[in-house]
Amino acid sequence: PVPEGVEHLDVEGSSHKMLFIISAVSTAITLISSIALITMHLSRYSAPKEQRQIVRIVFAPFVFALISLAEIYNYSVARYIDPISAFYEAICICALFLLYVQFAAPAATVKGTFGEDVFDAMKARQETDAGKSKGNWPRTTWIAVFQYPLAQIVAIIILEATEAAGTYCESSLKPKY
């Protein structure tokens, strides 16, 4: 909810400016930390497939911090830009899964594509580690992980459209909202 008259930082006598300053400093620290970690990974780019995913994951805190800073700066836009962080979270979950695949089946992913050989190598690795197979979990997990960003995009479009039309109500469970 937007407090009356609060649109941006022109609010005198409130804690809003202090909150924004703290958020800006935290965002700057997060940016410096993210850039330092990304630079270290890219300066020693010896395992590109793994490090590419690590860079995507390491950049996530800065994206979240930047979106939070923008939401604090202007409360009225918060509900419209908050879904961006949810979408980037979905991208990071995919990156985390791809990082796992690179570690679990490095020899199978040499070609850079994910085909049956990758799924077979992941299943074989699990059978070696646990002693028996648990079905086709690599393919099922692959489908579940990579449908999440698509579902998130659809949810964001629906959320933004209903927000703009004035029919979205966050606190109601009624189907019309």
Image (cartoon, rainbow, N blue to C red):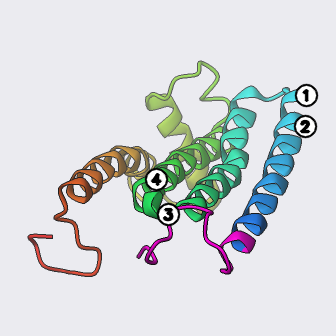
Quarter containing the N terminus: bottom left
Q: Residue at x 72, y 36 (%)?
A: 50
Give the residue number, with chain letter if any, for mark 1: 43
User: Which stretch did the figure color magenta?
Assistant: 1-18
Closer to the eye: label 2 or 4: 4
Q: Label 4 is placed on what type of residue? A: Ile
> Element type at marker 1?
helix
Closer to the eye: label 2 or 3: 3
Chain-order first, disc 2 or disc 3:
3
Q: Label 3 is placed on what type of residue? A: Glu
Q: Label 2 is placed on what type of residue? A: Met
Inspect the magenta stretch and tell me whether residue 93 lies in it: no
Closer to the eye: label 3 or 4: 3
Q: Which mark is residue 27?
A: none
Please rate how many residues cluster around mark 4, counting C-alpha atoms within 10 Å: few if below 14, some from 14 to 19, many from 20.
Answer: some
Give the residue number, with chain letter if any, for mark 2: 40
Q: Is residue 6 left or right of residue 139?
A: right
Front one among 73 and 116 = 73
Q: Residue 33: where, in percent of width, then height?
A: 85, 50
Front one among 30 and 153 = 30
> Element type at marker 2?
helix
Q: Are marks 2 and 1 in contact (CB under 8 Å)?
A: yes
Mark-to-mark CA distance, 2 and 3: 40 Å
Q: Residue 83: where, in percent of width, then height?
A: 43, 55
Q: Is residue 143 above or below residue 5?
A: above
Q: Residue at x 84, y 56 (%)?
A: 29
Give the residue number, with chain letter if any, for mark 3: 7
Give the residue number, with chain letter if any, for mark 4: 81
Q: Label 1 is placed on what type of residue? A: Ser
Q: Residue 104: where, in percent of width, then height?
A: 65, 45
